[in-house]
Amino acid sequence: MSWKDIVCVVLVILGIVLFLYGSNAYYAVAGYAGIGLFTGGIVLYAVLQVYKAVLKNSEKLEAVKA
């Protein structure tokens, strides 16, 4: 696991914990921050995977052209 994957996992876990804390304590700001961190972690992971796939594909195209 790279450090980028670990950051995404930590964001998702922190988001879940903040959401659960916010819903239990009736503290809306913490709940919405948790939702934001949760979705941000998932979106960041997806963007990084797409970027990695596009970068790998472009390297293959350059190798074919050369």
Image (tube, rainbow, N blue to C red):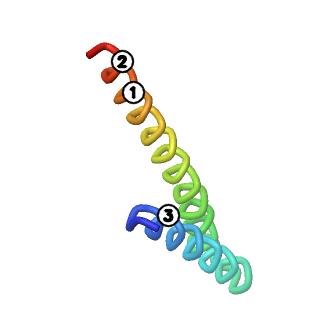
| Side of 63 relative to 39 (left or right) | left
Specify which label sits upstream in the sequence, 2 or 3: 3
Q: Position of residue 30 (x, y in %)?
A: 57, 74
| Side of 64 relative to 33 (left or right) | left
- 58 and 44: which one is in front? 58
Q: CA distance from mark 1 to mark 3?
A: 27 Å
Label 3 Cα neighbours within 10 Å, binned few <14 / some 14-19 / many ≥20: many
Q: Residue at x 38, y 34 (%)?
A: 55
**SS for dot 2:** helix
**Circle 1 is placed at which residue position?**
60
Query: Marks 1 and 2: in contact by CB < 8 Å?
Result: yes
Quarter occupied by the C terminus: top left
Label 2 Cα neighbours within 10 Å, binned few <14 / some 14-19 / many ≥20: few
Which of the two marks, 1 or 3, is nearer to us in this view? 1
| Side of 34 relative to 62 (left or right) | right
**Circle 2 is placed at which residue position?**
64
Q: Residue at x 53, y 59 (%)?
A: 41
Specify which label sits upstream in the sequence, 1 or 3: 3
Query: Which of the 4 image quadrants contains residue 13?
Result: bottom right
- 29 and 12: which one is in front? 12
Label 1 Cα neighbours within 10 Å, binned few <14 / some 14-19 / many ≥20: few
Q: CA distance from mark 2 to mark 1?
A: 6 Å
For badge 2, the amino acid type reads Val
**Circle 3 is placed at which residue position?**
8
Q: Position of residue 61 (x, y in %)?
A: 38, 20
**SS for dot 3:** helix
For badge 3, the amino acid type reads Cys
**SS for dot 1:** helix
Q: Residue at x 54, y 63 (%)?
A: 37
For badge 1, the amino acid type reads Lys
